[in-house]
Each structure stands twice: as structure tokens, then as C-alpha cells.
Amino acid sequence: MAIVSPDGAINACYLLGQEWEAKGLDLCFGHINDDGAVALDKERLASIRRLNVWNKPFCARCFCQWHCAGGCHVNHTPPNSAGDYDRLCLQTRTIALRNILKAMGRQDLIRELLREPEAMERAVRQVSDTLVDLEERS
């Protein structure tokens, strides 16, 4: 995705530049000149492309990593310890869990999770969702 601002800057985010800078990010990777010529900074674009779920260790053991792709790079800055999910993570994990159970035809489990908040909390706050870690906990 590319956003072109009124001054011709080509950005990888629709938020204001001040918001990125506050998080130590520079998401501008080019400019459209007055004559319409496009100038791209290929190194900066490559750097922005590395802001993805493959380079977010926090997301490595979450079953939603391919759904949310690590979330917004500016506003979604979770802590670095696995399982210490923020509000956006918990919302995404809850919705994805419901969708998986629905696709499996397990509306009974959805209803059970909704009736038992403690069970829902345990389900969406798992430190790791990987099978390797599940085997170690068993």
C-alpha cells in the first residue's frame, strides 16, 4: 500500500508523519515531483518491507500471526515478552478463535467460552499456541 500526501510524499502509512517519528519510524519511501516524476528510495522501501510478522519475535508463537500480520507498526507496539498481549492482540485472538471454532462446527464450544469468562481468558492469553510448546506443557 502506498499513500500519496498532498505535498507529493509517498508513504507506507496513512497516519501523520509525526506519529511515526514518535515511534522512531520513517515510513516515507518516495516523492512525486511537480512534473509528475516519481522518485523512490529503494533502501528505505526495503527497510519498510522488513516491518512484517517474520521480523516480530513477539508474534512467532501466536496462532493469529498470519491473520493480523503483527498489526499496525505505529500504534500496535506490544511488549516483547510472549503472551503479554495488548488490547488489539486479545481482540484479534478472540475473533479468530470464534471463527475457527465456527468453521469446525463447534458452536457448543463458542457458547461455553462465552458463558465462562475464565475459560475465554485462558484461551486467548495462552503464552504460546505452537504445538511444540503445547506438548511441553502436557
Image (spheres, grey):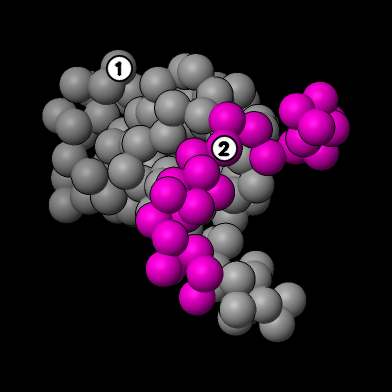
Q: Which of the marked residues, 2 or 1, is nearer the chain's N terminus?
A: 1
| Residue 89 in sight here | yes
Q: Is residue 127 above or below residue 129?
A: above
State which quadrant residue 128 falls in. Answer: top right
Q: Is residue 103 above or below residue 79?
A: below
Callout 1: SS: loop
Question: What secondary structure do most residues of the magenta stretch adopt?
Answer: helix
Identify the image quadrant of the C terminus.
top right
- Residue in the picture at 70% in, 82% down: 105
Whole-percent x, y for residue 23 in the image = 27, 21
Q: Is residue 63 above or below residue 67?
A: above
- Residue in the picture at 19% in, 21% down: 22
Q: What numbered label is drawn on residue 126? A: 2
- Residue in the picture at 17% in, 40% down: 16
Q: Is residue 20 above or below residue 80?
A: below
Q: Which residues are magenta?
A: 111-138
**Whole-Å distance between the Cαs marked 2 and 1?**
30 Å
Residue that carries the numbered disc 1 in the rendered image: 24
Q: Is residue 107 left or right of residue 48?
A: right
- Residue in the picture at 33% in, 23% down: 25
| Residue 10 in sight here | no
Q: Nearer the viewer, residue 128 or 10?
A: 128
Q: Is residue 108 left or right of residue 24?
A: right
Q: Is residue 137 magenta?
A: yes
Q: Nearer the viewer, residue 80 or 36?
A: 80
